[in-house]
Amino acid sequence: MCESHKHKVPEGFEDIGTFGFPPQDEKDHPPSIDDFKPAYLASESYRKNGYHCEELRDGVYWVTDGGYDTAFVVTDTGVIAIDAPPTLGENILAAIEAVTDKPITHVIYSHWHSDHIGAASMYGPDVRIIAHDITKELLERFPDPQRPVPHETFAKELVLEIGGKRLELSYKGANHCPGNIFIFAPAQKVLTKIDIVSPGTTPFLHCDASENITGYIDAHRQILEYDFDFLVGGHVRRWGTREDVLTAQEYFQDMLDFAHETLKSMSNFETASKFLSDPDQYWVGVENWLNTMTNHVTKKMLEKVTSTGQLWQERLAGVTTMTKYHAYTVVESSRLERTHEGYQMRDGKSPAYIW
């Protein structure tokens, strides 16, 4: 391992050279923006308990461990919990018990992924679990005792009126994954939409490991259709605002524009064949071709002067580390999910891009 990385990389990191991912050195990256470091991180309560909880408005609470977050609603008759990230685990129960002695009566699954509902069994057998039809189907197909199968499901819309509180559940199609729903408290103007926008930061790599990237990008627009003041996004250190969603939307629109530009210039037959001409090293050529497009988009993103006059790394945390992963995903998903603007003709003529 390189001497410069000894104090930066955890013991046991396996550096396998060109066959793997190189270690990152902190000195090569800017520090996180200030609003990625909210005040509660320095509080005695957070340091002692490992979580932070605050009331957003009128019985809707936000709880976070600084990496994952979720929400719960205190009603006249009990508590509605949303999700159960295992990193928070029973700290969610502690947060609820700190504000009410009412029982947890309902649990809503945002989607089926274990990192967000993998502790749901802790709520016990008496709660009523609500989710989308697809979430139930997936949990029945891939059973997990920590993620009990929902009792009640819906296809498009479901309104819950429980103990004087109203929640509107909606499914608008696959984005982060099939079955990922919107959960809106209209009176409190709190919207929970998990794994789309990570306020103040870029998402986890590869567009938060999303399955439908076109749907993922479009979900930003769908979020903005709601009249919300608070966004619970599932990650990472604070709840979000409308401005956070607009910022994330602009970031991915820039990336989508650069990806389209790059595909048009580098996915035509003439350019791609320069990388793929050696049959003995075809897959090396494929990697170099994809990585060259990814690097071009990444460079454009890091150089872009955004709508505020700032660079992206001055507006969002994690830009210099995560952008290359997002760029790869957006380039590749554009090849799969969006038009190629034509196809190879019999007379040898080809469109803007075909690969």
Image: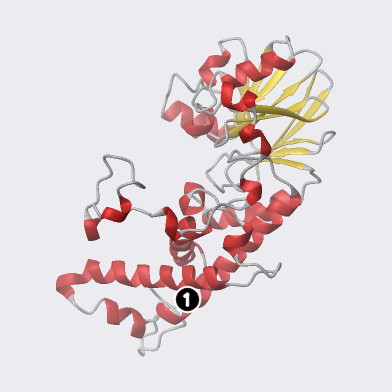
Classify mark 1: residues with Cα within 10 Å, few (<14), some (14-19) or many (20+).
Answer: some
Rendering coords of residue 183 (x, y %): 70, 36
Rendering coords of residue 164 (x, y %): 84, 21
Rendering coords of residue 321 (x, y %): 46, 56
Q: Is residue 248 left or right of residue 189?
A: left
* Circle 1 SS class: helix
Q: Which residue is mark 1?
A: 262
Front residue of this view, candidates 173 and 295 = 295
- Quick one: quadrant of the C terminus? bottom left
Measuring 45% from the left and 81% from the top, which residue is drawn there? 265
Q: Is residue 15 left or right of residue 131?
A: left
Measuring 68% from the left and 13% from the top, which residue is drawn there? 97
Asked which quadrant contains residue 61, the reply is: top right
Q: Is residue 131 left or right of residue 329?
A: right
Please say if 97 is above or below 302: above
* Colour approach in the figure: secondary structure
Please say if 53 is above or below 291: above
Measuring 49% from the left and 65% from the top, which residue is drawn there? 334
Amino acid type, label 1 = Thr
Asked which quadrant contains residue 66, the reply is: top right
Please say if 345 is above or below 232: below
Number of disc labels: 1
Front residue of this view, candidates 250 and 16 = 16
Please say if 184 is above or below 308: above
Rendering coords of residue 239 (x, y %): 68, 40
Q: Residue furthest left?
A: 280
Measuring 72% from the left and 28% from the top, which residue is drawn there? 54
